[in-house]
Amino acid sequence: MELYNTLSRKKEEFKPIKDGEVGMYACGPTVYGLPHLGNLRTYVFEDILKRVLTYNGYRVNHVMNITDVGHLTGDRDMGEDKVENESKKAGKTAWEIADYYTEEFKKDLIRLNILFPDIFCKATDNIKEQIEMVETLEQKGYTYKTSDGIYFDTSKVADYNKLSHLKLEDLKEGARVESNPEKKNSTDFALWKFSPVDTKRQMEWASPWGVGFPGWHIECSAMSVKYLGNHFDIHCGGADHVNIHHTNEIAQTESATGIKPWVNYWLHAAFMNIVGGKKMAKSAGNFITVSNTFIEKGLNPLAYRYNNLSVHYRKPMEWSDDIAVSASNGYQNLLKKISNLGTATGKVDLEFKNKFTADINDDMNMPKALATVQELLKSDISNEDKLATVLDFDKVLGLDFEKATLASRFNLNMTIPENVQKLLAERKTARENKDWKKADELRDKIIALGFEVKDK
Ligand code: AMP
Ligand code: ZN
């Protein structure tokens, strides 16, 4: 199996650290707003990655954090805490905001058939571990203090730019925007921030440096090490995390543990943009959700998953409302073809299985895998074998193919039997004659035959 590693900018053969097992960490949501389709693109991609690994026989230990503290409105440790900020706007506590949006996030995972991680961990439940890591960094001489917090000195790390592949000067130039003048280097970042003196924060903790809260990057380092160890296989997220968040996670973790590499494979999903190439972002407020693009329009949200599978995860996507409709049509057509196969399952076709496995193992080439599904459906193997094979592929695709077979299993296309039609006609006449008693009796008879009557 080959995966594209952002660290080497190459497709590499995947080799797990431990035989048959994979440790995988995925950066979770910042829970101050509804997840938009862009965020969910990244979570669908991670779900496919996990399912592909599982299909290959690995046992995947999938850990995901919930960022409920420390992510500031400016990505460079400036501005307000996103969760506290939303709490003021909404008139709820920061804890209520975080809980509410965590549940909304989980609902979207369910709607998109995204398997839950083995471990969900909240930043606020792991403050001790974060403080301990900052203490280690301090003891090893990687930190310094400013008026607003404890910072990591990036000039102490020789390979700070190894994930971004950018020149150090370019990274520094990028970081100069909204930079804190007290920082030694513009790329330095906060490990611990002091609570402001003029306002009372809702989420704050005592620490060796004073009352405050953790910097955004340290939570992922502390929790991934806690749950997956000092050296694990895969770390993933959206492409926006490469130059700052993941670069900083690597710098602080490898400095704290002294073990390199911390993570063997770094995988990133390309962005979902809105038409015109503009980034879809919660903070920009231009986001579209599963609810407002699918559910409220009566479309199946799994069409969004299907749409994601039809574009390679490293290729940027553009979103428009037309795509929701065309994705739904494409998905419904596929389900129809599968429901037409009937209900009897035969054997998984090995030739097609090999082809499908080659597609998904080539850096998750899901567009090609979907083409293989269409090829299978068009082929001349028996319907029973087609169904068995397509249901096997659905372990990776997660497109609810089994449900598609329900239509034929329960004969949903059946016509209403004559005796029931006769009772319906009699009931209609009774209602026209305002004979409500008779109409009700006839309704009971119809119900007894297994049908329901609705007057609209
Ligand atoms: P956030 O909740 O903003 O911290 O982001 C959660 C995840 O979504 C991270 O892995 C981000 O990299 C990813 N993400 C954010 N915006 C987009 C987007 N427009 N397209 C794809 N992934 C995104
Ligand atoms: Zn992270």
Image: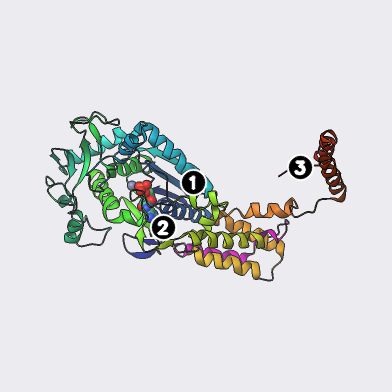
Find disc 3 in the rendering and name its residue. Answer: 453
Check whether the beta carbons of the residues at disc 3 and disc 2 lie within 8 A of each other. no
Disc 1/disc 3 C-alpha distance (Å): 33 Å
Q: Is mark 3 on a helix, strand or loop?
A: loop
Q: Is mark 1 on a helix, strand or loop?
A: helix
Which comes sooner in the sequence, label 1 or label 2?
A: 2
Which comes sooner in the sequence, label 1 or label 3?
A: 1
* Label drawn at residue 108: 1
Q: What residue type is labelled 3?
A: Val
User: Measuring 17% from the left and 54% from the top, which residue is drawn there?
Assistant: 176
* Most foreground residue, 6 or 287: 287
Dot 3, how many residues are within 10 Å of its Cα: few (below 14), some (14-19), or many (20+)?
A: few
Q: Can residue 113 be seen in this view?
A: no
Q: Where is residue 244 in the image (x, y as percent from the top left)?
A: 26, 52
Q: Check if residue 399 falls in the magenta segment.
A: no
Q: Position of residue 193 (x, y in %)?
A: 21, 37
Q: What stretch is highlighted in magenta?
A: 338-363
State the scheme by which the image is colored: rainbow
Q: Position of residue 118 (x, y in %)?
A: 46, 42
Q: Is residue 343 visible?
A: yes
Disc 1/disc 2 C-alpha distance (Å): 32 Å
Q: Which amino acid does label 1 sit on?
A: Asp
Question: Seen in the image, is 271 located left or right of residue 416?
Answer: left
User: Measuring 30% from the left and 51% from the top, which residue is drawn there?
Assistant: 246
Find disc 2 in the rendering and name its residue. Answer: 15
Q: Residue furthest front?
A: 433
Q: Which amino acid does label 2 sit on?
A: Lys
